[in-house]
Amino acid sequence: MYLFPMIQSNTEPTRCPWCLSDPVYLEYHDSEWGFPSHDDHTQFQFLVLESAQAGLSWLTILKRREGYRSLYENFDPERVARFDQQRISRMLADPSIIRNRMKIEASVSNAQKFLNLRDEHGSFCDYLWTFMESRQTVNRFEKLEDIPATTALSDAIAKDMKKRGFRFLGSTILYAHLQATGLVNDHLVSCDRHSQCIHEKKT
């Protein structure tokens, strides 16, 4: 897992208000959320977690991430793509993750589609960054209520991925994925992480 901790200073940092309710959120905000990912392992991890989150709070999923990491073979898409029904049944009996058959079966199918995209584009990251024209979207929102749940960008990616057979990855989940993996920087302008997470795509 790639972590990009908040740059420390002598004063308490200013953060996005959504992360202040729980230490797990705080750590996630300060070390991961919004930093641009060019790593397929990170991308697959968040695809699994974001699709599991559908209908639930993100904090619920974060608190179970180690369970997902264990059962999903450290988020290795090649291994997950080979999970069979026997393996899925064992996962459904494990309380360390959300035991939803449709979501688990979708994650296995999505792993297979993920590998197809990787083979087609060289990497899943390259596939996603193509929609961005290889440039991070840096928003300058001042209030949480200004941040959208979906955009034309997430609509387009979700539509394309749905055509390719991905499941539990609609526009709302895809926008959350873009925020989490830093293709879209939605830290508030008042947050210290806003400037720290501005990053150009590596060439």
Image: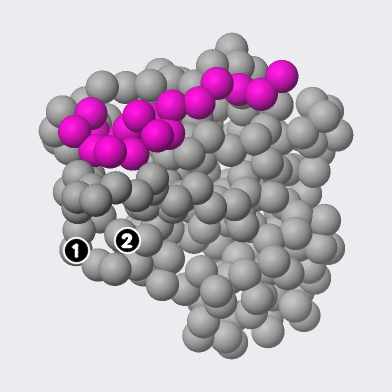
Using the image, tell me which numbered label, if any, was put on residue 25. Answer: 2
**Residue visible at 32% across and 32% down in the picture:** 194
State yes or no: discs 1 and 2 in contact (Cβ < 8 Å): yes
Kindly indicate the quadrant of the structure image that contains residue 27.
bottom left
The spot of residue 119 in percent (x, y) is: 85, 34
Q: Which element is circle 1 on?
A: loop
* Residue displayed at 50% across by 26% down: 199
Identified at 60% across, 65% down, the residue is: 104
Magenta segment range?
185-203
SS majority, magenta: loop
154 relative to 74, above or below? above
Image spot of residue 111 (x, y percent): 72, 52
Residue under label 1: 21
- Decide: few, some or many residues near mark 2? Use Cα within 10 Å; few <14, some 14-19, many ≥20: some
**Amino acid type of the residue that numbered disc 2 sits on in the rendered structure:** Tyr
Is residue 66 shown above or below 138? Answer: below
On the image, which quarter does residue 58 sit in? bottom left
Q: Is residue 86 left or right of residue 4?
A: right
Q: Residue at x 82, y 29 (%)?
A: 122
Amino acid carrying label 1: it is Ser
Residue 66 coordinates in the image, percent (x, y)? 55, 74
Left or right: 167 with respect to 165?
left
Cα separation, mark 1 vs mark 2, equals 7 Å
Report the quarter where the N terminus lies.
bottom right
For label 1, the crowd category at 10 Å Cα-Cα, with few meaning under 14, some 14 to 19 and many 20 or more, is: few
Report if residue 178 is visible in the image: no
Q: Position of residue 169 (x, y in %)?
A: 52, 43
Report the front residue among 97 and 22. Answer: 22
